[in-house]
Image (spheres, grey):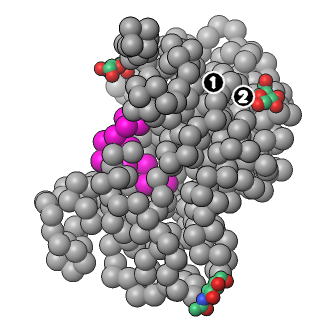
Amino acid sequence: MQFTFSAAFFALVLAAAAVPTKRAACSNGRTAAHASCCVWFDVLDDIQENMYAPLGDLTFHDAIGFSPALFFEGKFGHIRLYLLPRGTDGDDSDGSIMAHSDVETLFPVQLTCAHIDDIVDAQRPFAIAHKVSFGDFIQFAGAVGVSNCAGAPRLEFLAGRLNFSIASPPGLVPDPFDPVDKIIARFADAGFAPNEIVDLLVSHTIAAQDHVDPTIPVRTPFDSTPSVFDAQFFVGTLLVGQTFPGNGSNQGEVVSPLAGEFRLQSDFAIARDPRMACEWQSFIGGNTQYWNTNHLICFCCCPSANHGTMTTKFRAAMSKMSTELKNLSEALLLREMYFTA
Ligand SMILES: *[C@@H]1O[C@H](CO)[C@@H](O)[C@H](O)[C@H]1NC(C)=O
Ligand SMILES: *[C@@H]1O[C@H](CO)[C@@H](O)[C@H](O)[C@H]1NC(C)=O
Ligand SMILES: *[C@@H]1O[C@H](CO)[C@@H](O)[C@H](O)[C@H]1NC(C)=O
């Protein structure tokens, strides 16, 4: 009894401390800590009701379009953007895919992997109508899209990206037919370790192909449960491939285990790469030994995990991707190098 009382009292104190004394009143009786957050309730209502384009497909394609390596070579980047603190930066999740869709959506990877151009066109009017920056809108829509799936984590969303960007150069979004070494190198440039590539690929549990194979229905899924945020994608990718869902092999496609399911060559290869197989299998949980002995060469002893680990790692990797890596100390370092170069 005493314990119950203390716990309840403690919770009350915490709640009182956490809630600011004066919250901003938003639409439909909702409140937010800051008035500038209210707009996101309206965006939420609007996109949940009125937007039929996929919500999450632009997050990665926008965010990965930056390259410290190219910046140091003096080939791409804008010093002003590198000077901004984390969360308000540019050159990455900066909305450039929407602001410069005339350039970026014409890259072959955007045309073959998904109809990124159509999705940009569908999303843009919503961002303009609500007067939010393109970069913020894309990451917000992505967070909403993920949360719409059963079992998905709520992703962190931080607003405040500038509505200014420069078009990203071609070649920064990995292709599904890229060799694994090339994919790892591209992500390393963007600040992601091999394990974090796998963490980002958790998104494929609720993803689908659009244009890799033009002969099959759009949004042919990567796993048998595309609306559920589960580990089925990680299991399915380890199964022996049997068939193509369409009329044959396309660039970036390999045989999938089930009819109606699409398997990307990059997913197939990453699942079996010794640098990433462990992280891959760790999301499956249960009897990983079964998967090791029956479906692929055992590269390592993988600890079994569960849904919680998968969602936590995905959430962390998405936060990192959407807010990017450039913090102030990195920015200062870059400024030094820029001005002394
Ligand atoms: C962001 O920039 C685009 C042009 O790239 C413009 O159409 C849009 O209205 C701007 N949004 C805001 C909130 O300033
Ligand atoms: C598969 O579909 C593509 C696109 O429609 C077509 O060009 C190709 O001839 C087809 N291949 C076969 C073997 O049917
Ligand atoms: C800032 O960047 C430096 C250099 O990459 C890194 O060591 C440090 O952990 C970062 N700090 C934060 C708060 O992200």
Residue at mark 2: C-beta within 8 A of ligand 1: yes
For label 2, the crowd category at 10 Å Cα-Cα, with few meaning under 14, some 14 to 19 and many 20 or more, is: some
Q: Quadrant of residue 32?
A: top right
Residue 135 placement, left or right of 41: left
User: Residue 62 placed where, x, y %?
Assistant: 59, 41
Vertical position of residue 287 compared to residue 243: above or below: above
Q: Quadrant of residue 60?
A: top right
Q: Quadrant of residue 316?
A: top left
The kind of residue on which mark 1 rests is Arg
Boundaries of the magenta span: 187-203
Q: Which mark is residue 170?
A: none
Query: In front here: 335 or 292?
Result: 335
Q: Are marks 2 and 1 in contact (CB under 8 Å)?
A: yes
Q: Which quadrant contains ligand 1? A: top right
Q: Residue at x 57, y 25 (%)?
A: 90
Query: In front here: 85 or 292?
Result: 85
User: Residue 25 placed where, x, y %?
Assistant: 79, 18
The residue identified by callout 2 is 133
Residue 285 on the magenta span: no
